[in-house]
Image (cartoon, helix red, strand yellow):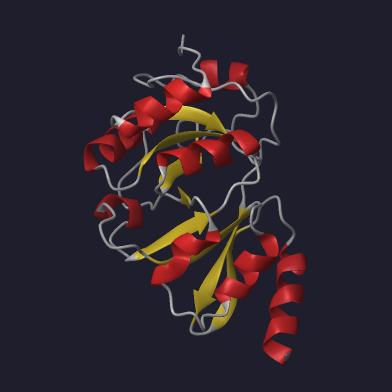
Amino acid sequence: MITALDEATAISRLKCGGVVIVPTETSYALMCIATDSAAVARLMAIKHRPSGRPLPLLLPSIATLEHLDPETPLLVLAEAFWPGPLTLVVPAYPGLCAALTAETNMIGVRVSAHPVAQRIVVAVGQPLVATSANRSGEPAPATVDDCQLAGLLGVDGLVDGGPVAGEASTVMGLVDGQLVMFQPGRLAEARVREVWLKARAG
């Protein structure tokens, strides 16, 4: 049984290198600080995540993308759809663990629209790894009961935020200057492309 936590305790455990389950608008997610290599290694072991597969991040705000070229067209999509279930693949931040990017030097990022997740990320004050709280290949958990039944060993606690959608975020990025969808998800690709085309035309 994974221990139930309030938000303040979850924040404290994350800051101390813990791995905690937190609700997002897509699914319940395993979270840890993205620059803590020991915490990232623990999270990957808990999830049975094979090496060579990158892990996404939740950001405190769009301002966390300050390392990007201000002219990058992906910022238009971030401004249009964040907070929300759109993950954008961007150049990685300095200091991230190589395991997070699978040594591609790229990372998927978004700002969560779930109030619990957003309060926790802002309180921690830096990007958090956020990957569905399940073993790799299993369905994304939509409830606390799903998390308890997922067979995740070694988690430092769970924050109950009620039922969530239980589906992935849409993952998009640039390949040779063209917008590409890497993973379908809760946000319709057509909506993203509509904003993209208007921005490019304007």
Q: Quadrant of the C terminus?
A: bottom right
Q: Is residue 20 above or below residue 194?
A: above
Give the side of residue 200 with respect to residue 111, left or right.
right
Q: Is residue 89 above or below residue 132?
A: below
Residue 110 in sight from this viewpoint: yes
Q: Is residue 23 above or below residue 162?
A: below
Q: Position of residue 116 (x, y in %)?
A: 60, 33
**Rendered residue at 34%/57% (across/down):** 101
**Rendered residue at 40%/32% (across/down):** 47
**Rendered residue at 70%/50% (across/down):** 186
> Observer-nearest residue: 96 or 15?
15
Q: Residue furthest bottom?
A: 201
Q: Position of residue 55 (x, y in %)?
A: 41, 49
Q: Position of residue 140 (x, y in %)?
A: 59, 34
Q: Residue furthest left?
A: 38
- In which quadrant of the rendered view does residue 143 lie? top right
